[in-house]
Each structure stands twice: as C-alpha cells, then as structure tokens.
C-alpha cells in the first residue's frame, strides 16, 4: 500500500474528483479526512469508505474560512495523531458564479480557488513541519497555464494563482521537509456535463488522445505526488490533459 499509515486531508471530497481521490487514498492505506462544505454528502462518502474496510471521517469545512481550517487540522491531529498529506482539491468553475465579468464573481473565484489553497497550505505546512515534513498537492487546471477559457477569465486567473503560489510555497516550506506540487487536469466528463454535444465533441477533437480524461486518471497522479515515491519532487506541475496544451 502506497499510503500505509499516512493521514490525509482532501478538500472538496464529498463528490467528483475529490471523492475519487479519497476512495483511492483509502484503498492505498491512508486515513482520510473529507473536508467539504457539503456535510451530509461528505459523511456518506466517509461511511462508504469505512464500510469497505478503509478509514475515513468527514469534517464540515468552509475552505475560505481560516477558522475552519484551524479547526479541521486540530481535529485531524486529535483523531489520528498527525497530518502527512493535504490535497487542496476544492474549487468552483467560472460558470458557477454567473456574470464572468462581474466583480463579485471574480472575488468568489479567487476566494474559493486560490485563497483556500493559501490558507490550507500555510496551516498544514506548519503542522507537518512539527513531524519532519509532508506532502501538499494543489489542484489547479490547464487553464492555470493557458488562457483558453475565454469566457471565464476569473477562473483562469484563480488557477494560475494556484500554479505560481505552489512554486513559492515549495521554496518556502522545502527546508522544513514539506513538498508542495500542483496538478493540472484537462477536460473531464464532470466539467462538460452541461456542454452541448457539439461542444463536447469539439473538446475531444482538440485533444491528441481523442477522448476526455477520467477522474481516476487525475487521482492516480495526485497519489504519486502525495506518496513517498515522489520524495524528491517539489515545486513541480503535473499536467494530466491528454496532450491538450502540448499543441
């Protein structure tokens, strides 16, 4: 088991890609804390993991609240004795905030997608440093590397902030043994559920592998960066997009 005896917090793990990561981590031996504002859904995922012989619990967390982050980490350590891994997975899409050019939407995107990563990283790194280090994986996007989401500039900006903050955090916390890396997923079925058939087909045609990615393919990359197999990897960005931005 690649994460045997490790303790991992995964934000936004009540559904979607975060849920896939939580289930994979638990299957690989980690004790998983599901941190999500969706309390009922998070508890259901944790219960399902435990029913499958894994170890997990759910802690309701608003990732833009520093107080919630402090409580989350304190409860995790109180329950499991330590914190080895943080996956900053929680995020929202540009379409979720309405007016893509409105100030309110811009600020909401930056708060959920970027400020949450800053809060989680700094507080988790401080806890990890007490025990010699750990691994933090920040979920960005290919749109944090290229500005391809022309109708959602706030989303691109927020994910670009995650990308460069990850590098700065890797430099800052490396001397304490804390590794910080980012993952940049491409187009996945959950992201295109609301897209018409023609739009979905266009994204597939633009991807060299000629298909969409699957959440488990991203989760496997996150697992590698979280594990000791990546012990000399920090400040890196792992693109998982079927070759989309290689063109």
Image (cartoon, helix red, strand yellow):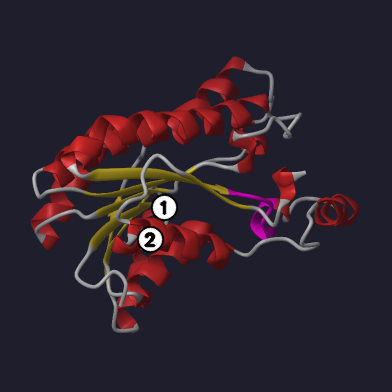
Q: Is residue 158 magenta?
A: no
Left or right: residue 156 versus residue 238 is right
What quarter of the picture does the C terminus occupy? top right
Q: Which mark is residue 138?
A: none
Left or right: residue 142 versus residue 114 is right
Of 110 and 224, nearer the camera is 224
Q: Is residue 100 above or below residue 195?
A: above
Q: Is residue 71 visible?
A: yes
The residue that disc 1 covers is: 38
The magenta segment is: 185-191
The residue at 32%/62% (across/down) is 227
The residue at 31%/31% (across/down) is 171
Q: Position of residue 66 (x, y in %)?
A: 26, 31
Q: Position of residue 160 (x, y in %)?
A: 55, 30
Total count of labels:
2
Secondary structure of the residue carrying tag 1 is loop
The residue that disc 2 covers is: 42
Left or right: residue 15 versus residue 67 is right
Q: Quadrant of residue 121?
A: top left
Tag 2: Cα neighbours inside 10 Å, few (<14), some, or many (≥20)? many
Q: Is residue 52 above or below residue 49?
A: below
Q: Is residue 216 above or below residue 95?
A: below
Whether pointer 1 and pointer 2 mark residues with C-beta atoms closer than 8 Å, the reply is yes
Secondary structure of the residue carrying tag 2 is helix
Left or right: residue 235 versus residue 220 is left
């Amino acid at each position: 088991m690649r994460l045997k005896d490790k303790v991992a917090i995964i934000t936004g793990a009540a559904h979607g890609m975060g849920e896939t990561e939580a289930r994979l981590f638990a299957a690989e031996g980690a004790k998983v804390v599901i941190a999500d504002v969706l309390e009922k859904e998070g508890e259901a995922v944790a219960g399902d993991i435990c029913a499958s012989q894994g170890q997990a619990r759910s802690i309701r967390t608003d990732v833009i609240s520093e107080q919630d982050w402090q409580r989350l980490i304190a409860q995790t350590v109180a329950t499991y004795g330590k914190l080895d891994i943080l996956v900053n997975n929680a995020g929202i899409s540009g379409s979720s905030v309405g007016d893509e050019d409105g100030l309110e939407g811009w600020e909401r995107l930056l708060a959920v997608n970027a400020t949450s990563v800053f809060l989680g990283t700094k507080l988790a790194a401080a806890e990890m440093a007490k025990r010699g280090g750990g691994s933090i994986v920040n979920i960005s996007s290919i749109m944090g590397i290229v500005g391809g989401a022309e109708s959602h500039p706030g989303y691109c900006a927020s994910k670009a902030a995650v990308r460069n903050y990850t590098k700065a955090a890797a430099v800052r916390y490396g001397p304490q043994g804390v590794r910080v890396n980012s993952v940049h997923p491409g187009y996945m079925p959950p992201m295109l559920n609301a897209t018409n058939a023609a739009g979905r087909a266009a994204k597939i045609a633009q991807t060299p592998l000629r298909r969409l990615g699957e959440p488990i393919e991203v989760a496997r990359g996150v697992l590698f960066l979280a594990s000791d197999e990546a012990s000399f990897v920090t400040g890196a960005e792992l693109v998982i997009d079927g070759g989309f931005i290689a063109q």
